[in-house]
Amino acid sequence: MQYRRLGRSGVRVSALSLGSWVTYHNQVGTDAAVEMLAAAFDAGVNFYDNAEVYAGGHSETIMGQALKRLGWPRLNYLVSTKFYWGLDRSGEAVNRKDTLNRKYLMQAIDGSLRRLGLEHVDLVYCHRPDPHTPIEETVRAMSDMITQGKALYWGTSEWSAADIRAAWEIAERHHLHKPVMEQPQYHLLHRKRVEQEYARLYEDIGLGLTTWSPLASGLLTGKYRDGVPEGSRATVEGYAFLREGLTDPARNAAVAALAGIAREIDATPAQLALAWCLRNPRVSTVIMGASRVQQLHDNLRALEVLPRLTEEIAQRVDAIALPLAA
């Protein structure tokens, strides 16, 4: 396993990490989570990503139960959570959904820690920007989480470069804990934000990236070229919104072409896509998803594929993918 610094911080994260979005509770229970977490840990993975909203809090509960059973030394792994959407979707608790106000954030962290069974999370994110709460209020609340020892580093997810910089400058001006990392979507077909919009932030503020959806929700594996297979995440209740992008003919034609390049370098399409993300030196860690141990082992082999992804191969990959990229 390779380990990379999280931006300009001192903590190091495994180049490949394991996330729980869609899978935990929807596809994976505690027993399967224990098995996959153990397989990932044995391969050197030290970062496990979660969020309050995943499966309505059940994802955190499953991960917490699995971590308790595994009994690893706390120093040996990092866990994250994210806040914005909240758990009350009834609309009755107006300060507990679609917000980053102080009242919500300071209570949300306590709920996540209870579900995870942890005294602190290592990384905590503002899961989306909140246009209705002053950024200074959010920054102070996130900084206080760090001061109180409930989290060690904080960052953002899917924020604009302008908002990230504003948050960082507020923290700098008031001597608060600064945002360290951003969690953006990043894959062969979604790249402008990471490669263009954030370009100045890497040097200016030392921004680290924990990127998600490296396989474009499974599109880049090639399994959607002939429709939506039974048991895939596009069939999971509540995730039908993924279906249109996964069955897009132009994108699947590109995936077929990429599969040919993958065969040339003795890789699967998924391993090629993961290795391509790893090739970006600005990426601290690439968050994988897996619902089976064999799938996890196959994806971990992307590290072996990385040296085969030469400049010439990367240019050929870009020639296929870039015209369709957002």
Image (cartoon, rainbow, N blue to C red):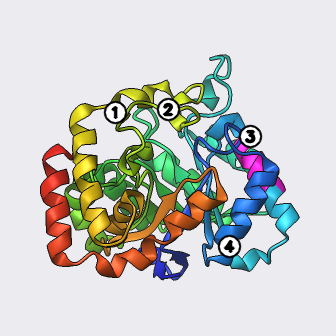
Find disc 1 in the rendering and name its residue: 245
Q: Can the viewer see residue 123?
A: no
Q: Position of residue 161 (x, y in %)?
A: 29, 53
Which range of residues does the magenta coloring cover? 58-65
Mark 3 residue element: helix
Q: Which quadrant of the view contains residue 242?
A: top left
Mark 1 residue element: helix
Q: Residues within 10 Å of mark 2 (few under 14, many from 20)?
A: many
Find disc 2 in the rendering and name its residue: 234
Q: Are marks 2 and 1 in contact (CB under 8 Å)?
A: no
Q: Residues within 10 Å of mark 3 (few under 14, many from 20)?
A: some
Mark 2 or mark 1, earlier in chain:
2
Find disc 3 in the rendering and name its residue: 58
Disc 2 versus disc 1: distance between alpha carbons?
A: 10 Å
Judge whether residue 300 is colored magenta: no
Q: Can the viewer see residue 301?
A: yes
Report the front residue among 301 and 16.
301
Report the front residue among 306 and 146.
306
Judge whether residue 64 is colored magenta: yes
